[in-house]
Image (spheres, rainbow, N blue to C red):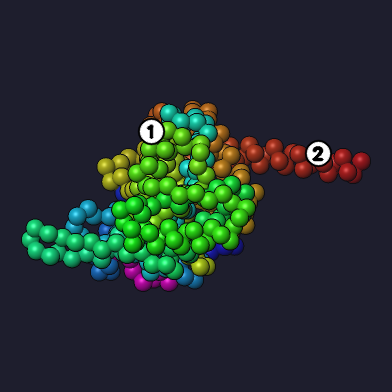
Amino acid sequence: MRNITLMPGDGIGPEITEAMVKTVEATGVKINWERFEAGADVLEKYGTPLPDHVLDSIKKNKVAIKGPLTTPIGTGFRSVNVTLRRELDLYACLRPAKTIKGVKTRFENIDLIIVRENTEDLYAGIERQIDADTAESIKRNTRGASERIVKFAFEYAVKENRKKVTAVTKANICKLSDGLFLEAARKVAENYPQIQYEECLVDNMCMQLVQNPEFYDVLVLPNMYGDIVSDLAAGLIGGLGVAPGANYGHDLVLFEPVHGSAPSLKGKNIANPTALILSAVMMLNHIGETKAADKLYNAVIKVIEKGETVTPDLGGVNSTMEMADAIVEEIKKMSSGFNLFEKAKLELYEN
């Protein structure tokens, strides 16, 4: 049995987390979920939104999955998501954006991989208040982190038989910081002649993705641009509700949906669980449970394609758990069909 750290999150997090757990367990994979709370809901109890025992569990188990966590805007504590990435050195954020049949969108056949540097750039939070009317943020890129993330993107491209990696920056304006990232990307690209390498400015990339998304494959970006462009890519496939994600370190991985905690939907049981469930598909593949991952992915796709038992944002009238139950039923059908097939093969062999 595999131990996996589980953080339900806040807002809609607990609801979609229960849906995810139910569907994963339906595949038959045995997981011991080590549940921990984090975020605004535990701030008063522990004096921090991210208690040390949560970090200790992730370090021990090496694999974690979480629901969304609310980040106060403009005031309050720093992002728990950013803190997790920094404290655990989860330097690579991987966000696939792939079209799902049945999800309403203006685009077809989208299949993009966004690789975002996770530890520096403007997200490092190096800020100061100069005076009452002036604030300053420092954008910091380092050669080591830049080379590391570009290498991750190329290694992923090789592993997944991808054809092209595009480095995305604003090096025409940020000549030193983004220029360093671009210099590092060019150096790393020389080691992967089998993968096509190209470069694009981030503003042009945003335009290209809404005009010619089929021209792109794997995108690698500094932290801030990666966050923005991955949301844009999610919009191409129907929204954040169907966008999964993962954060990779040297030997740790944290899986999570791209979307936020949607406090206004809390407790209504109508949030779309797809993004978190697809994040769990990525998790299952990571731990070697590839058959279970395929089963879960195909069940999700089947339910959405049918459109009979989906949440309101997908055009349905069903609750979060009703959609989860429909996915479980699809998994049972697949398992039943597989068992009958295996039985037939055995009988044929015995005869």
Q: Is residue 31 visible?
A: no
Q: Earlier in the sequence, mark 2 or mark 1?
A: 1
Question: Which stretch appears magenta?
Answer: 49-57
**Residue depicted at 53% across the width and 51% down the height:** 197
Q: Quadrant of residue 287?
A: bottom right
69 sits left or right of 112 in the view = left
**Residue depicted at 40% across the width and 43% down the height:** 205
Q: Nearer the viewer, mark 2 or mark 1?
A: 1
Q: Position of residue 316 (x, y in %)?
A: 42, 29
Spatial CA span between label 2 and label 1: 42 Å
Q: Which residue is mark 1?
A: 313
Q: Which residue is mark 2?
A: 344
**Residue depicted at 54% across the width and 58% down the height:** 189
Q: Secondary structure at mark 2?
A: helix
Amino acid type assigned to the residue bearing label 1 in the image: Asp
* Residue 107 tag number: none
Q: Position of residue 174 (x, y in %)?
A: 31, 56
